[in-house]
Amino acid sequence: MQYLLQLLISGLAIGAIYGLIAMGFAVIYKSTGLVNFAQGEMTMITAYIAWTISTTVSGNVFVVAVGAILAAVVLGLVIERLVMRPMLGEPVFATVMVTIGLAVILRSAINFIWDAYPHGLELGMGRGIVHLGGIGVRTGQLAVIATLLLLLVAIWAFFRYSKVGVAMRAVAADDRTALLMGISATRVHALAWAASSVIAGIGGVFFALSYDLSPAMFQLGLKAFPATILGGLDAVLGSGLGGLLIGITENLAGGYLGSGMKEVAGFAMIIVVLMVRPFGIFGERDIERV
Amino acid sequence: MRTGDYKQSYGELVALIDSPPVWLWSAVLLLALIAAPYLLNSYALSFLMIILITVTGALGLNILTGYTGLISLGHVGFLVTGAYAYAVLVSKYHMPPLVGFLGAGIVPALASLIVGAPSLRLKGLYLAITTLAFSFIINTVILEMRWLTNGARGIQVQRPEILGISFDSDAAFTYLCLAIAALTLFATLNIRRSRVGRAFVAIRDNDTAARVMGINLHAYKLFAFVTSAFITGIAGALYGIYLSFVSVEGFPFLLSIEALAILIVGGLGSALGAVLGTVLIVLLPEATRLVFSLFSAQMDATFTTGAQELKSMLYGLVIILFLRFQPRGLLGAWHDIKRAWVHWPLRY
């Protein structure tokens, strides 16, 4: 029982990180209709920048947090402007391939700029242990779960009530009609890339806080794929919850079936889910007109 | 001089070789390839081998992604399955290499049925991600089946001896690769101009319309998966023999992306494009190194220390630039040049 609870809690914690990155995927998909294969790499860059700030400027939590968020915004905007905007109006396949090319470039750039050794992000917090009913939990793990839940509520409210959120949903539903209504599609796209970069970047920084920074971190993006597919590519909230589900499944599979299963439990799960619901658990069925 | 295409029947339109100059140049290319192992040094020969093996794999992916329009991000999964099938059959159970090659085709083809079947309900990106999931799952399966695959330790593979001919030397092995690559090229070109190929292209262009015209989507999509996996598996076996060692690390995920890059750079949906793309992508890092070393010894040193990073950065950059400025790939560029040459100074 103790073991099971331990697995569940650490599953929730890693699942919350997957959930944050998966929400990053979903925000971009929802407003531009693209899967951003460079999401894991963007997450990684934000985490590495946070580490650089913490070692060179100041280890203060707030300085690092503000710096990392600003860096993530700039990263998202620059990528949208330089790489994605010229591809507006091109076929989806071509645009998605561009993000794959971008992923390859960013990954090598990280190895080139920073080194290939693992680093720990030390902020003087997040690694302390709290006892909850006899189970030791890191404060960082609790913080990331809380952050995910908070962001889920905030994003739900944003898409439901704010003018910009409604504009983003309009562009996603039908960009031509949205344009006719006076919504600037390019501005919505830029906003989506910046928001996605920030949300995923938060996940990346939390990952660095609980585990370590290393060049293999881009695999977080691949791990978050099952989460966003499970929730439905166009469901931002579903993706966040999908992350929690994948995290728990992965940890249970790793704990009871062996470490090899841990790596692929998420992928095996999405193949099963997609066979039953080809558009994810919370996704909307695509109706095709001929 | 040739001033345009004057085709009067469907047979002429789909003919593989439609004019004497094309005959001539194809013959010259074939002779050059046959003479190459005797003329090139071993360094250049290794590039030729890699090109021939990669062409085979790229043609395999071309059937699935180029002709049928089903994007696969997990083709390295078929590559590694083929390599392991060959290695297990030949090195572990001492079967003749021909049986090994047959197994290297059939095992991935069977695996493709497993990944293809659920993929029939999926479209576009969801399918791409399913194939991605497949390639990760297959790696774990190989690592877990230690009794068959030696797990992470990998399997040693010898150069084969087929029908009494030893392919031990580099030159002989190049001929083996050349023969298989040429056979694959003819096979894919002929698939494209047959009823099956037309069905593939119809599915790619609009699958609903294809279905309305009476094309059995399930059968043809599965057929595309099986054919593609068969060819890719054989390329995997060749690559395993080339490396003389088969392990999961020898087939990184980047190979899947490299294969897609080859198709895009060459020109999606054309066998000739796959060949051109392979030549460019395989030689690109080497060509860049040459250019760098021309500038200064110092830049050459940077290239050696960060070689792997710069190489993958180049892939990414080339993919993005081609998609942005020449979406029809090298083949499209070649068509443009040809038209400009014929019509100059008029535009058309």
Image (tube, coloured by chain):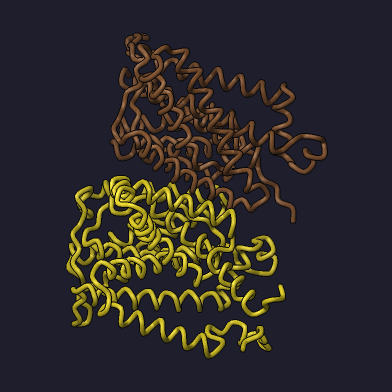
Image quadrant assignment for residue A7: top left
Q: Nearer the viewer, residue B229 or B286?
A: B286
Question: Which residue is drawn at the image coordinates 39% and 37% (left, top)?
Answer: A110
Q: Nearer the viewer, residue A84 or B131?
A: A84
Question: Residue B202: image x %, image y %?
Answer: 63, 67
**How many labels, in total?**
0
Horizontal arrangement in the rendering, residue A62 relative to residue B240 (left or right):
right
Can the viewer see residue B140 in this picture? no
Can the viewer see residue A143 in this picture? yes
Q: Nearer the viewer, residue B91 or B2?
A: B2
Above or below for A82 versus A121? below
Question: Residue B123: image x %, image y %?
Answer: 58, 52
Above or below for B122 versus B89? above
Image quarter (top left, top right, bottom left or bottom right) of the N terminus of chain B: bottom right
Question: Residue B290: image x %, image y %?
Answer: 35, 59
Q: Which chain is yellow?
A: B
Image quadrant assignment for residue A117: top left
Q: Which chain is brown?
A: A
Question: Which residue is drawn at the image coordinates 42% and 48% (left, top)?
Answer: B313
Horizontal arrangement in the rendering, residue A102 relative to residue B107 (left or right):
right
Above or below for B211 versus A37? below
- Which residue appears farthest toward the bottom when viewing the image? B20
- Which residue appears farthest toward the front when viewing the image? B296
Horizontal arrangement in the rendering, residue B222 relative to residue A84 (left or right):
left
Image quadrant assignment for residue A173: top right
Image quarter (top left, top right, bottom left or bottom right) of the C terminus of chain B: bottom right
Question: Which residue is drawn at the image coordinates 42% and 35% (left, top)?
Answer: A220
